[in-house]
């Protein structure tokens, strides 16, 4: 399986089988104007399996062992 960690206050870990689709949601409180997901504190790789990585809910399709990482979402507020 593949273990994905979503970095937020609770550090949630998802354990999913290889080949599955992971849906990661940012913990949002209040108004947010932009989202940007990262993998292990680096920009998301240029891989078509990673979709919606500038939205609240990112997806990783066809999980592989190399996707086991910590994912975080940086959010900005209007103003």
Image: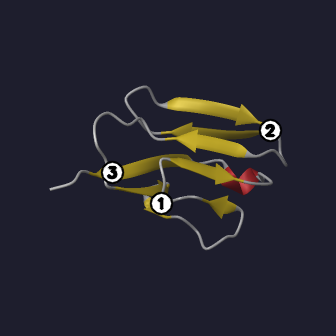
Q: Are marks 3 and 1 in contact (CB under 8 Å)?
A: no
Q: Earlier in the sequence, mark 3 or mark 1?
A: 1
Image coloring type: secondary structure
Q: Residue furthest top?
A: 10
Q: Secondary structure at mark 3?
A: strand
Residue under the point 78% across and 53% down: 64
Quick check: 11 above or below 75? above
Mark 3 lies on residue:
75
| Secondary structure beneath label 2 | loop
Residue under label 2, please give it.
Answer: 1
Which numbered dot is residue 78?
A: none
In the picture, which quadrant includes the N terminus? Answer: top right
- The x and y percentages for residue 42 are 45, 63
Mark 2 is surrounded, within 10 Å at the Cα level, by few (under 14), some (14 to 19) or many (20 or more) other residues, namely some
Pointer 1: residues within 10 angstroms few (<14), some, or many (20+)? some
Q: What residue appears at the point 65 percent right and 33 percent down from the top-left corner?
A: 14
Expressed as whole percent of the image width and height from the top left, the position of residue 53 reads 53, 59
Nearer to me, 23 or 5: 23
Q: Residue at x 71, y 56 (%)?
A: 66
**Which residue is at 21% across, 54% downward?**
78
- Most extreme residue toward the left is 79
Image position, residue 68 (x, y; %): 66, 47
Per the image, label 1 sits on a secondary structure element best described as loop
Q: Where, quadrant-wise, is the C terminus in this rendering?
A: bottom left
The residue that disc 1 covers is: 54
Residue 43, compared with residue 72, is above or below; it is: below
Q: Earlier in the sequence, mark 1 or mark 2?
A: 2
> Relative to 55, is 47 on the left or the right?
right
Disc 3 to disc 2, how far (Cα)? 29 Å
- Is residue 19 found left or right of 73 in the rendered image? right
């Amino acid at each position: 399986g593949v273990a994905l960690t979503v970095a937020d206050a609770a550090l949630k870990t998802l354990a999913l089988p290889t080949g599955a689709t992971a849906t990661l949601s940012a913990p949002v409180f209040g108004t947010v104007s932009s989202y940007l997901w990262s993998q292990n504190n680096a920009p998301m790789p240029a891989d078509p399996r990673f979709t919606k990585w500038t939205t609240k809910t990112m997806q990783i399709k066809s999980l592989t062992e190399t996707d086991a990482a910590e994912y975080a979402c940086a959010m900005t507020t209007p103003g």
